[in-house]
Amino acid sequence: MEHSAAKYLFLRFLVYAALIAGTFEWLVVATRSHGVHWLVRDDGPVEITQFLAALFTALLFWLLSRERPRSADLLRFFSALSLVACARELDNFTLELGSRDAYKWIAMVPLAWALSQVFRARGRLLDQLAVFSRTSGFSLLLAGFLVVVVYSQLLGQKALWLAVLDPDVYRPVKDLVEESSELLGYLLMLFGAAEATVDEQRD
């Protein structure tokens, strides 16, 4: 039984690795055929893919919260945070509608939901997190979160790229590296949510 579960886990991670490899190989092909500006523009395919990955992550966690009452508070909290990420990716859309900061107000809705879960769950949230932290889904989710929130933000600092590239050429390189790093993080979080759906632990 344990060997079967290990093989199943290995196969799932092979699928995740193949999806990541395929996504980034597509980035290479798209950059060669359409140019980096098309790829990483604010309404371009990378931004759209980031939004969809965060949206599906939120949906998976929300659906799971309906099936697993003992961990529902934590799963709804994760869903709310994923929706905050979705709102963040809408910044260019709201800008085109005439408001630079409207996406921040949109993000307030899922943020309020997340805070309400923290308030309602209180001590239960930490207990649920302790259980979830022993799953493979937690490792992927945490890795993706750190890539999106920490690594890609540090890597996208203007001063860093100006230190190694000329001011006239740094921006496309910076945007490509930053946005592709964020995309990797969003994919890892989506895979973490997918792992949670097949986790053998049940309420």
Image: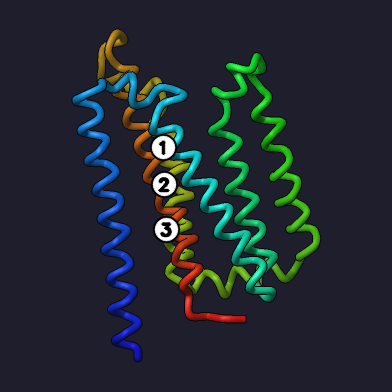
| Badge nearest the viewer, 3 or 2 | 3
Counting from the top left corner in percent of width and height, residue 42 is at 46, 23
Residue type for callout 2: Gly
SS label for mark 2 = helix
- The correct choice, above or below, for 142 with respect to 36 in the image is below
Closer to the camera in the image, 181 or 37? 37
Mark closer to the chain start, 3 or 2: 2
| Residue at (60, 56) in percent of width and height | 78
Mark closer to the chain start, 2 or 1: 1
SS label for mark 3 = helix
Q: How many marks?
A: 3
Counting from the top left corner in percent of width and height, residue 116 is at 78, 54
Mark closer to the chain start, 3 or 1: 1
Counting from the top left corner in percent of width and height, residue 163 is at 30, 19
| Residue at (63, 59) in percent of width and height | 62
- Measured in 3D between alpha carbons, the distance from the residue under mark 2 to the one under mark 1, in whole angstroms, is 9 Å
- The correct choice, above or below, for 157 with respect to 18 in the image is above
Q: Which mark is residue 191?
A: 3
SS label for mark 1 = helix
| Residue to which mark 2 is pinned | 185
- Measured in 3D between alpha carbons, the distance from the residue under mark 3 to the one under mark 1, in whole angstroms, is 18 Å
| Residue at (47, 57) in percent of width and height | 141
Q: Is residue 122 left or right of residue 77?
A: right
Q: Residue furthest right?
A: 120
Closer to the camera in the image, 29 or 151? 29
Decide: marks 2, 1 in contact (CB < 8 A)?
A: yes
| Residue to which mark 1 is pinned | 152
| Badge nearest the viewer, 3 or 1 | 3
